[in-house]
Image: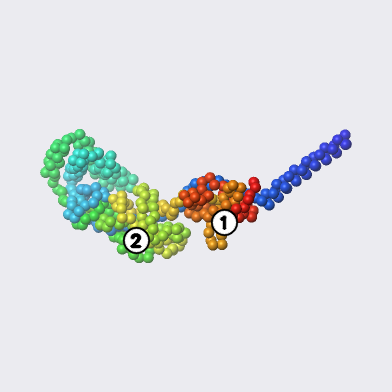
């Protein structure tokens, strides 16, 4: 029995030594000639910066003629000098008639142009404007004119429903009769040409000339710390064709922007939209933040009512091949390259880095130029003594 126990112990010890030797030989082989590849696949990488800032335009406030002011043109509409932009009405009956007249004019224009209704094209209607004003007052808990807003919303909806099935001659006759009976109205005409907006927020005094100063985040905030009151304003006219977005960004993101280049701005506040804007200026940092100014010469009608907004500024977006960072090498001339395994050999391929994330580079696909660095290529991540043309036995 003792002999049997001894035999088992000897066999177990021999097996243990054999396993250790196998592990040791495998580790030695791996250390002596580590070899690892990865298949090249297409990927994309983008980077953006968070921004908070203000829309700045050349704006001129137009005073009304007294009473309740009702716009005669739509938000964002271009008007010429001398064009009627608003009416002033006194009394609830006059206001209700004004809403009905505007609904009639809109319906007549639709029938004349033989187009879809304005709400189907994404435009606003008197009913929508009245309902929006009522909703905004409720959200702000401003109940001073709640009864009047309810009356306007009801009359506008009624007028829109009443005119939906009428013919063009009937609508014109009704509009003529309504205008003939209208009393207590004053008219407001455009003193200059521009884009009309009914939104007067008190910051119209801040124009593009303010951007000629060297701005800090504190100075930008100070510009919009006080809203100038405009009682009885009929709206405003935006006279320039360029609008600006002056925004505060992190200091570390500023070097990624280039003055004179284009940047894609995605506004994420109350008005969600995307615009391609020019980087006009990047001011020196202050307290880890800096001010960047962007400009755009299109889409003014989309931002007439927008002042403050948060946004995402696209710094860059690239597509190419994903290459693990350990696979990238640098030659004496500062050029980056990788080794591609093909036909039992390592082949040197120069790689143009387009972008990077934490663990990979995004490089240009060399397939159009006939290079081996293309989708599906075996990129050598690990290997000892690599050089161009080295024979590798796997």
Query: For numbered disc 2, what is the local secondary structure?
Result: helix
At x 40%, y 58%, the residue is 248
- Judge whether residue 210 can be spotted in this image: yes
Check disc 1 and report the residue beneath it.
329
In this rendering, would 323 be left or right of 226? Answer: right
Could you tell me residue 271's position as x and y percent? 35, 48
Circle 1/circle 2 CB separation < 8 Å: no
Depth check, front residue: 135 or 205: 205
Of callouts 1 and 2, the N-terminal one:
2
**What quarter of the picture does the N terminus occupy?**
top right
Colour mapping: rainbow
What residue do we see at 75% from left, 46% from top?
A: 21
Between 234 and 347, the one nearer to me in the picture: 347
What residue do we see at 43% from left, 63% from top? 285
- Which residue is farthest right? 2
Q: Position of residue 251 (x, y in %)?
A: 45, 60
Of residue 194 and residue 393, the one placed in the foreground of this image is 393
Q: Nearer the viewer, mark 1 or mark 2?
A: 1
Q: Which residue is mark 2?
A: 223
Snapshot quadrant of residue 261: bottom left
Q: Is residue 103 visible?
A: no
Residue 29, image x and y in percent? 69, 49
Mark 2 neighbour density, 10 Å: few (under 14) some (14–19) many (20 or more) = some
Residue 379, position as x, y percentages in the image: 56, 49
Residues at marks 1 and 2, CA–CA distance in whole angstroms: 51 Å
How packed is label 1: few (under 14 Cα within 10 Å), some, or many (20 or more)? some
Which sits in the foreground, 150 or 348?
Answer: 348
Q: Residue furthest bottom?
A: 213
Relative side of 344 to 145, left or right? right
């Amino acid at each position: 029995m003792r002999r049997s126990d001894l035999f088992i112990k000897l066999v177990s010890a021999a097996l243990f030594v054999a396993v250790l030797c196998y592990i040791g030989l495998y580790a030695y082989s791996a250390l002596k000639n580590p070899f690892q590849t990865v298949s090249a696949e297409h990927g994309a990488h983008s980077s953006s910066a968070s921004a908070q800032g203000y829309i700045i335009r050349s704006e001129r406030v137009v005073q009304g003629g007294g009473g309740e002011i009702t716009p005669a043109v739509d938000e964002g509409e271009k008007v010429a000098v001398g064009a009627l932009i608003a009416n002033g009405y006194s009394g609830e009956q006059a206001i209700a008639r004004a809403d009905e007249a505007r609904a009639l004019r809109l319906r007549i224009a639709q029938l004349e142009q033989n187009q879809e209704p304005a709400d189907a094209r994404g435009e606003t209607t008197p009913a929508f404007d009245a309902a929006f004003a009522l909703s905004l007052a409720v959200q702000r808990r401003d109940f001073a004119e709640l009864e009047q807003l309810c009356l306007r919303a009801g009359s506008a909806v009624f007028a829109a429903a009443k005119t939906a099935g009428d013919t063009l001659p009937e609508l014109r006759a009704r509009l003529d009769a309504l205008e003939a009976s209208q009393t207590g109205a004053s008219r407001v005409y455009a003193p200059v040409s521009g884009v009309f907006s009914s939104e007067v927020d008190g910051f119209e005094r801040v124009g593009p000339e303010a951007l000629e100063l060297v701005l800090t985040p504190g100075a930008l905030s100070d510009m919009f710390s006080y809203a100038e009151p405009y009682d009885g304003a009929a709206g405003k006219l935006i006279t320039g064709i360029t609008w600006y977005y002056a925004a505060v960004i992190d200091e570390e993101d500023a070097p990624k922007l280039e003055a004179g280049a284009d940047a894609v701005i995605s506004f994420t506040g109350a008005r969600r939209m995307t615009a391609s804007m020019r980087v006009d200026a990047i001011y020196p940092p202050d307290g880890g933040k800096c001010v960047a100014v962007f400009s755009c010469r299109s889409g003014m009608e989309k931002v007439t009512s927008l002042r403050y907004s948060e946004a995402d500024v696209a710094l860059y977006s690239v597509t190419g091949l994903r290459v693990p960072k350990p696979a990238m090498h640098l030659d004496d001339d500062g050029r980056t390259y990788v080794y591609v395994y093909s036909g039992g050999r390592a082949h040197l391929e120069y790689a143009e880095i387009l972008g990077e994330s934490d663990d990979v580079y995004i490089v240009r696909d060399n397939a159009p130029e006939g290079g081996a660095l293309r989708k599906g290529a075996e990129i050598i991540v690990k290997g000892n003594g690599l050089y161009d043309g080295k024979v590798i036995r796997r």
